[in-house]
Amino acid sequence: MSNDTTVSRIFKLIVLLLVLVVTGWLLVSISSTLTILIIAALIAYILDPLASFFVARGLSRMQATIIIFIAIAAIVAGFFAFLLPPFINELKTIETGIASGSSNQFFNDIETWITDKIPIITKENLDFQNRLLEMARNMSSSVFSIVGSMVSIVTTLVIIPFAVFFLLKDGPHMKKALVSMVPNRYFEMVLNLIYKTDLQLGGYLRGQFFDALIIGILSTIAMWILGVPYFILIGLFAGLANMIPYVGPLTGAIAAILVVVLNGGGGNLLLFVALAFIIIQLLDNVLVQPLVVAKSVDLHPLIIIFAVIIGGQFFGILGMLLAVPVTGMIKVLFGELYSSTHSYNIF
Amino acid sequence: MQENTLWSNIFRNQRQKEKSIETVLKQVPIFKDLSSREIKALERILHRRTYRDGEIIFNENEPGVGMYIIENGKVFIKSGKNEKVLAVLSNGDFFGEMALLLESPRTASAVANGPLKMLGFFQPDLFHLLETRPQTGNKILRRLAQMIAERLRQTTIENSELKNKISRYEAQRDE
């Protein structure tokens, strides 16, 4: 009897491992399509309460989705009309800014200081200016390539909104259809699992999104008031970087300080920029985060760092930004799965 | 067999043959106050499940998530290791409604007796309804509260009758 149980357990474990390996292989081989799907699903998931709000006020799910899409289209059109040209312009001026005379002197000063202090390092080893120039060139050329390449245009402008539209409109039906396929034995458990995961994850993901949005807007306004060049770019970067805990907020501030230094900004401006980011971070920690970010998903700093690295390895910068919410998602899902299988005596 | 207050459908009027979902739902006390439009909206939320003869719907002590309404077929409600049958439920009957409010382990098991068709209404669905259609959700919640109060009243009566019996028995024993 006990032998049978052991054999059955080993068999279950082998099947589980096999399923995991096949799933992993599948996920890696369709990673680019998967990124699109993850982004679309995340957007649809974040927008879902808005659709439910309209449905509660008597609209059909279709009408609610159309209203949301019209509003988003207006925002996107506004972005393209007002912000994209200066945004690309900012990227181009960063490039020329780094190559200019004032920053040339600045980099020479830093390099001389370092080589004086640490004799084993030569100026050729450092060459900060050219490295930064290379980085900026890569960044602006990648933005151009995204805007320029037909595949990216089709992906970003057609496939993602298309997927978001249907996920938002038919999301509840899809969920119900999926649940209806679950065998009776696991049905209640799966339903409970979906509900509890949604409860935790919804708050977490929406919180992350709104936090990034608020920090982005605050940083843009602060940089604009201080007269820092490329304020839109800095704001956008600070907002997105804020999604990565610990490192993100610091990266945003460093980017702003670097821009001020490269443009020959004085000590006072540097101080004000640093102060602005400290105040924004304080506001974020004291006011924004307790209000919008759910505390339920606590990730260990070590997990976050590795998740960001792995995300970067597989999906580049986008992967780094998506790493934290996706890890949060996996943590909640596995946590709930573990407690559910225990209370339903499944394994 | 004496019916169990907790598990039997004490709100049952008469045995029903297979009817449309709307008719079935309108006979369930917790949906009694809903308009036809609200019943239609509810129909979209409910989960339709089919079971084979002898298939377990839920086990005793497993976490309960919600209630079931029998569309067509029979259900045995069993309890304990010897699987004592507490109630036999059929078309139009419902069970497990306490799990809509209280997420606690099921106090009995439910097993299909013959081919069975049921409608499931679960706690997440009720909470979703309360958020998206508060009026409909509140009507259900009010009826649910009334039903649970009624069950409590009946249990209290049974409890006091039992206490009386025990004290009578003790008095007889002391004499």
Image (cartoon, coloured by chain):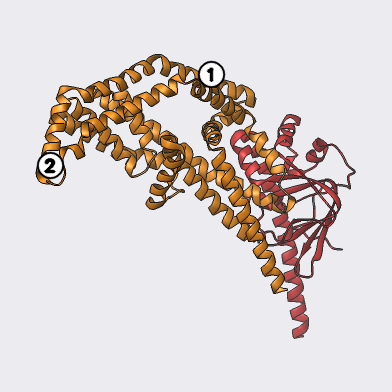
Mark in the foreground, 2 or 1: 2
User: Based on the displayed image, in which of its 4 quarters is residue B33 positioned?
Assistant: top right
Q: Earlier in the sequence, mark 2 or mark 1?
A: 1
User: Which quadrant of the figure contains the N terminus of chain B?
Assistant: bottom right
Question: Tell me, what hue is chain A?
Answer: orange
Mark 2 and 1 residues: CB-CB less than 8 Å, in contact? no
Residue at the spot 84% in from the left edge and 36% down from the top edge: B20
Q: Image height check: is A272 above or below A308?
A: above
**Residues at discs 2 and 1 both on one chain:** yes
Which chain did the image draw in red?
A: B
> Which residue of the protein is positioned furthest toward the left in this rendering?
A116
Residue at the spot 73% in from the left edge and 49% down from the top edge: A183
> Which residue of the protein is positioned furthest toward the top in this rendering?
A81
Residue at the spot 26% in from the left edge and 28% down from the top edge: A133
Could you say where residue A190 lies in the image, as x and y percent from the top left?
A: 65, 49
- Residue to which mark 1 is pinned: A70
Is A240 left, or right, of B110 in this rendering?
left
Residue at the spot 70% in from the left edge and 38% down from the top edge: A177
Question: Number of callouts in the render?
Answer: 2
**Between B175 and A16, which is closer to the camera in this rendering?**
A16
Q: Say whether residue A346 is visible.
A: no
* Mark 1 residue crowding within 10 angstroms, few (<14) / some (14–19) / many (20+): few
Question: Disc 2 to disc 1, how far (Cα)?
Answer: 58 Å
- Residue to which mark 2 is pinned: A115
> What chain is tagged by disc 1?
A
> What chain is tagged by disc 2?
A
User: Which quadrant of the figure contains the C terminus of chain B?
Assistant: bottom right
Q: Image height check: is B10 above or below A288?
A: below
